[in-house]
Image: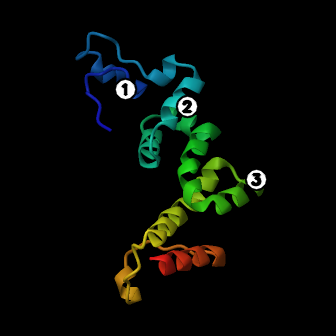
Amino acid sequence: MHHDPASPVFLCSKRRASLMSTCDVPPQNFAETLPTEMSERIFGELDTESLCSAALTCRLWHDIIEESEQVWRNQCSLVSAVCQREVDSDRRDGLSWKVTLVKNYTRSCLKRDWLRGRFSHVRSAEELRGRKMTPLDAETWGEILQAELDR
């Protein structure tokens, strides 16, 4: 996501002093002026990678993102589409939405790739070298086998 460097709305407080000389309008960090709930809704619209980048932008953004269960719940909805059983289990075990996402993100990407047939023609483990793998349970392997048989 690229923003115009002259746009004051998306800048963090740290850069305020250096930009004052180049802008007629004093830069503002939207998270400083909006209620926290509104900032959470804005951050909730980001994809996982952009959300992680936003958390590195400034302390305020980091704190809002880290502390918002709603932001991480939104991210988990994508993972849930592929790993619903695992997400439900983790939530029953009392894990936060963020921990649930971190725990299941790689698994959901791998499972999605298997179910889409990305690995249907792999002949040896060498072809998977460099690919991030994660353990999958017997039920997931059953889903993958069924998808392969249906192809």
Q: Cα distance, mark 2 to mark 1?
A: 17 Å
What quarter of the picture does the C terminus occupy? bottom left
- The residue lying at 39 percent from left, 80 percent from top is 128
In this rendering, the answer to whether 103 lies above or below 130 is: above
Q: Nearer the viewer, residue 125 or 146?
A: 146
Side (left or right) of 146 relative to 97: left
In percent of width and height, residue 113 lies at 44, 68
- Label located before the other in sequence (1 or 3): 1
- The answer to which image quadrant residue 140 occupies is bottom right
Side (left or right) of 71 relative to 8: right
Q: Nearer the viewer, residue 58 or 47?
A: 47
Nearer mark to the viewer, of 2 and 1: 2
Q: State the residue position of label 3.
A: 94
Question: In the image as oriented, which residue stretches furthest toward the left?
Answer: 22
Q: State the residue position of label 2.
A: 40
What quarter of the picture does the N terminus occupy? top left
- The residue lying at 54 percent from left, 30 percent from top is 41
Q: Cα distance, mark 1 to mark 3?
A: 36 Å
Q: Cα distance, mark 3 to mark 2?
A: 22 Å
In percent of width and height, residue 9 lies at 37, 21
Which three-letter amino acid code belongs to the residue tagged 3? Gly
Chosen colour scheme: rainbow
Which three-letter amino acid code belongs to the residue tagged 1? Leu
In percent of width and height, residue 93 lies at 77, 57
Q: State the residue position of label 1.
A: 11
